[in-house]
Amino acid sequence: SQELEQSPQSLIVQEGKNLTINCTSSKTLYGLYWYKQKYGEGLIFLMMLQKGGEEKSHEKITAKLDEKKQQSSLHITASQPSHAGIYLCGADLARGGAGNMLTFGGGTRLMVKP
Amino acid sequence: NAGVTQTPKFRVLKTGQSMTLLCAQDMNHEYMYWYRQDPGMGLRLIHYSVGEGTTAKGEVPDGYNVSRLKKQNFLLGLESAAPSQTSVYFCASRRTDLYEQYFGPGTRLTVT
């Protein structure tokens, strides 16, 4: 969706390296969701952010939502081959959206070279 | 506990044919969703349901119909398939009080 831009579109990193994926909108992100999709499979929920400045971590993955609530980043520390896949951000672009009408970014394809 | 399942996994249709995709969930979730995923366009919401007997339009509803006669099932119908409906279709469900959506494995549909 052009309302939610992800960068980069694809990324190849060496195992052990850190990386960052960005998700940007010109509109306010009332709820921001990060999902991971393994090739040929469905999406798996990673994290949800709602408040400006919020940061959440799970294992080696950290997601942040900026103070203006228009940009989110997903940071992976010491990448592993198991981190490979497509990362998608989804967002509520309407206040009170209740998580039903999510707009998704185009996805970032991550490959981790052993 | 199978989670969210989709039937069929693959299908090839000719232009003008009809078909129904079935989504089933065994988690007693109230909300269910149908998305399509096209290269470079992420996921786009087709229709969704906030409970048994209810449906609502999403971002790209034209050419599709849905029904939620039972809480655990959400059907997506294509009455007259078009090549533009070639895509991967995902179903998802979630609880009322949590925003996390659980996704099925997808149905790859090709319309020739």
Image (spheres, coloured by chain):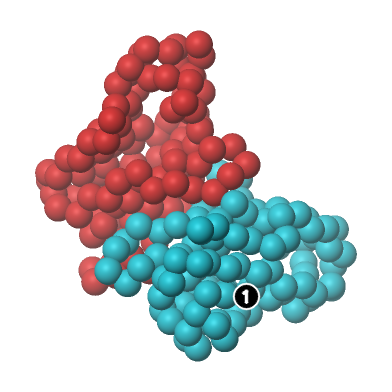
Residue A19 in view? yes
Residue B70 vs A4, above or below: the answer is below
Residue B80 horizontal side relative to residue B69, left or right: right
Q: Residues within 10 Å of mark 1 (few under 14, many from 20)?
A: many
Residue B14 vs B69, above or below: the answer is above
Q: Residue at x 87, y 64 (%)?
A: B14
Q: Which chain is red?
A: A
Residue B44 in view? no
Residue A16 horizontal side relative to residue B15, left or right: left
Residue B22 vs A56, above or below: the answer is below
Q: Position of residue A42 (x, y in %)?
A: 54, 49
Q: Residue at x 58, y 68 (%)?
A: B24
**Residue A83 placement: quadrant:** top left
Q: Position of residue B15 (x, y in %)?
A: 85, 67
Q: Which chain is cyan?
A: B
Q: Nearer the viewer, residue B73 or A111?
A: B73
- Output the chain of dot 1: B
Q: Residue at x 84, y 73 (%)?
A: B16
For the image shown, how many numbered marks are present on the structure?
Answer: 1
Q: Nearer the viewer, residue B52 or B64?
A: B52
Q: Residue furthest bottom?
A: B53
Residue B63 horizontal side relative to residue A43, left or right: right
Q: Position of residue B65 (x, y in %)?
A: 63, 79
Q: Secondary structure at mark 1?
A: strand
Residue B34 horizontal side relative to residue A53, left or right: right
Residue at the disc numbered 1: B75
Q: Position of residue A58 (x, y in %)?
A: 27, 35
Q: Residue at x 58, y 44 (%)?
A: A41
Residue type, mark 1 in image: Leu
